[in-house]
Image (spheres, rainbow, N blue to C red):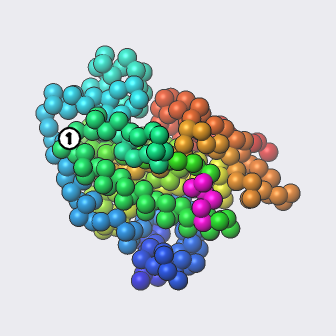
Amino acid sequence: MVDDMSSEDGVPVIDLADIQGPGLERICEQIAKASEEWGFFHIVNHGVDLDLIRRTQKAYIDFFHLPTQEKRKYMMTADFEGWSSPEVYNDPDLMKFGLTTAKTCEFMYHVALSRDPNQQPALSTIPPALRPMVLEFAKEVTAAQERVLAAMSVALGLDASALQNRFGPADVGIRANYYPLKREGKTVGELPAHSDLPAIVFLFADKVPGLEIRKDERWVRVKPVADAFVVNVADCLEVLSNGRFRSAEHRGAGSEAEERISMVSFYMPSKAATIGPMDELLDETHPARFRSANFGQMGLELLSTGLKGKGFVEALRIEG
Ligand SMILES: O=C(O)CCC(=O)C(=O)O
Ligand SMILES: [Fe+2]
């Protein structure tokens, strides 16, 4: 077991090996501290099979290496699912949806899992060579996300299931970002500064650096930790925790040493969920710092306006 480990950049590293045993209390304390101070932390011994992660990563890399005309078969559609790259973002096929998020690095996005038995994702849009891996990966990552959510609930003084229940049956979206080798400092597409909207996010990009996160007024280049996921408190969690946990702005880029892929899993509240401070956290001395909103309505509106800043958090903040 690793005690209060920290990578050189200061981003906390939390060992989850004992999350279902007597270590839970200590893990909850570490998660609370990291979520309050950073909004970001690495997790090791997360329970997601490493061989599965590597196979999924390899399958995505093979996809991104295909010729453009092959990848165009999976071009993004109006529901934001599919493939996009800076090379094609002016393409009329893509622009007809007004997809501003397309102006980022090359990526592919799919909803790969739904906790709602009546609303299963349309898996036919995931390239067949990727499908079995992506589905298995999404299943394991979702289970790990729910373990971390339970620890976060306990850390907030709530029942272990409180946050997950509040989100309702989640959808989990997987976004794979591809950054080709950077040549002579030239970038071929980056992810501009943004915070993630829903709700808890796991990012896997060990080995190759490129993720930068904002800590107070400075940008910190995250040093990769082998086999770890980077956990990110997203906007919805900041609002549910009434501002105790913070979502942090971050940005992604490629490297001059190696091509880079980041696999990002978004645990999304049900569209029917109300995103607002948890009632249990409010009293006379702790008034609500945010309004409440329907996730389906507000979330999609914000996503379609593109990536910038902490849009959702700011839109709901109560001044004063
Ligand atoms: O590639 C990265 O390191 C950042 C990815 C990211 O922030 C995202 O996909 O939302
Ligand atoms: Fe992000």
Q: What residue is at 58 percent from the left and 49 percent from the top?
A: 167
Quarter of the figure with the C terminus: top right
Outermost residue, front direction?
A: 118
Q: Where 52 falls versus 129 (above or below)?
A: below
What secondary structure prevails in the magenta region? Answer: helix
Q: Residues within 10 Å of mark 1 (few under 14, many from 20)?
A: few
Residue 216: quarter of image: bottom right
50 in the magenta segment = no
- Residue, disc 1: 128
Q: How many marks?
A: 1
Whether residue 220 can be seen here:
no
Q: What residue is at 23 percent from the left and 64 percent from the top?
A: 51
Quarter of the figure with the N terminus: bottom left
Whether residue 275 can be seen here:
yes
Q: Which residue is nearer to you in this view: 16 or 243? A: 16
Q: Which residue is nearer to you in this view: 158 or 286? A: 158
Q: Where 48 falls versus 98 (above or below)?
A: below
**Where does the magenta region start and end?**
160-165
Label 1 SS? loop
Q: Amino acid at mark 1?
A: Pro
Relative horizontal placement of residue 159, taking residue 40 as reference (left or right):
right
Relative horizontal placement of residue 253, taking residue 67 as reference (left or right):
right
**Residue 202 x %, y %:** 42, 56
**Residue 90 x %, y %:** 31, 21
Q: Is mark 1 within 8 Å of ligand 1?
A: no
